[in-house]
Amino acid sequence: MPKNLPIALLIASNLIPVIGVIYAGWSAASIVLVYWAENLVIGFYNILKMLTVASSKDDRLLPRLFAVGFFVIHFGGFAAGHGSFLLDIFDINTVPAPTEEQEWPGPLMLLQLLFTVMHTLFSEMPKGFMWAIAALLISHGASFLLHFLMGGERHRTTVNKLMMQPYSRVLIMHVAIIICGFFVIKLGSPLSMLVALVLVKTAMDIVLHRREHRRLQT
């Protein structure tokens, strides 16, 4: 597999929103919602990393499964909070909150909130957004295969480190995206600014991708 394939796929996956803007009339809000869905893709592959990491510190199955379960709940709650914030700033109608009788017990309530937010946001996703999600799955999947499994990163990290790894990339990325997206909306979502929003996200993706894997390779 070519070394630069993940970068090429990353760029290609980020260019799909440009096609959506030009041919399907995507707005800045649509683009930001699609990028929010990338949180779910990142979380999915991080779970696979936690299950396949080869550190000698993580050779026991039950602690590893407990860590994966904990990650699912706390990253799911983070993604739900992030999505709820997008619902508010883009004035998207939410689905009714569950009553006390319907609430899931304990920390599982965070996952219930995530599923509620996913239902609302996916109902507001633009036409053709599944192509963008599929491209993100392929892009992150290639990186997982080439860098983590074949490149040996699974031997140079631990479950505990992986548990916190997605947050730095997601936080930096989405603070910038939300600020730029809100600014573009205030300008009336002109085509040039929508394309600029995608290009900003693509450039940041490349920088954060290289920084992450450079750190794991040393």
Image: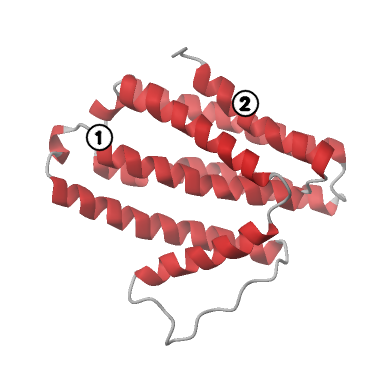
Is residue 42 positioned above or below 56 on the image? below
| Horizontal and vertical percent position of residue 92 | 70, 66
Is residue 164 positioned above or below 49 on the image? below
Spatial distance from mark 1 to mark 2, Cα to Cα?
27 Å
Write the residue at 44% across / 86% down. 100
Q: How crowded is mark 2: few (under 14 residues within 10 Å), some or many (20 or more)?
A: some
Q: Residues within 10 Å of mark 1 (few under 14, many from 20)?
A: many
Horizontal side of residue 59 vs 38, given as left or right:
left
Residue 211 or 76: which is nearer the viewer?
Answer: 76
Name which residue type carries label 1: Val
Report which residue position mark 1 lands on.
Answer: 53
Write the residue at 28% across / 51% down. 68
The secondary structure type at the circle numbered 2 is helix
Write the residue at 52% across / 30% down. 139
| Horizontal and vertical percent position of residue 149 | 32, 26
Q: Which of marks 1 and 2 is nearer the N terminus?
A: 2
The secondary structure type at the circle numbered 1 is loop
Is residue 156 positioned above or below 198 on the image? above
Name which residue type carries label 2: Ile
Question: Would you say residue 35 is visible in this rendering?
Answer: yes
Where does the N terminus fall, quadrant-wise? top left
Horizontal side of residue 96 vs 162, given as left or right:
right
Where does the C terminus fall, quadrant-wise? top left
Q: Which mark is residue 71?
A: none
Is residue 93 positioned above or below 207 on the image? below
Horizontal side of residue 77 vs 176, given as left or right:
left
Report which residue position mark 2 lands on.
Answer: 11
- Dividing the picture into quadrants, the one containing residue 154 is top left
